[in-house]
Image (spheres, rainbow, N blue to C red):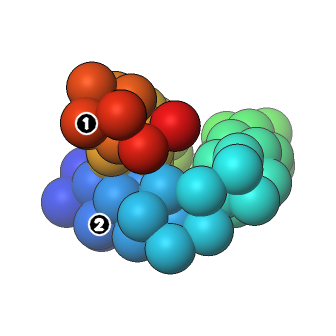
Amino acid sequence: MLMLGLLLGFLAGYFLLWWGALVVLAVMGTAAAMVVAGRSRDGATGVVAGVLMGYLGILLVALFRGVL
């Protein structure tokens, strides 16, 4: 789930840039719903951590390269 989150976060940041923040929020909301419904907390944590790391990582790369 962590790798899926990293991939999703990277793609959201790379192709959607600021609109990718909506993807991150949607994933976080879905993960919160999974936890409340009693499903896997570990999987939800992995996806949220991966999406945040992927999205923020690609935004930092863009910032340091002068694109933003």
* SS class, disc 2: helix
Q: Secondary structure at mark 1?
A: helix
The residue depicted at 25 percent of the width and 36 percent of the height is 65
Q: Which residue is mark 2?
A: 7
Residue drawn at x 52%, y 37% as measured from the top left: 68
- In three-dimensional space, the C-alpha distance between marks 2 and 1, rounded to whole angstroms, equals 21 Å
Coordinates of residue 49 in the picture (x, y in percent): 39, 33
Q: Is residue 62 left or right of residue 32?
A: left
Q: Is residue 33 above or below residue 32?
A: below
Task: Tell me if residue 58 comes above or below residue 66 in the rendering.
Answer: below
Which kind of residue does numbered mark 2 sit on?
Leu
Which quadrant, please, contains the N terminus?
A: bottom left
Q: In x, y percent, where is residue 7?
A: 29, 66
Q: Which residue is mark 1?
A: 65
- At x 59%, y 56%, the residue is 17
**Residue 5 visible:** no
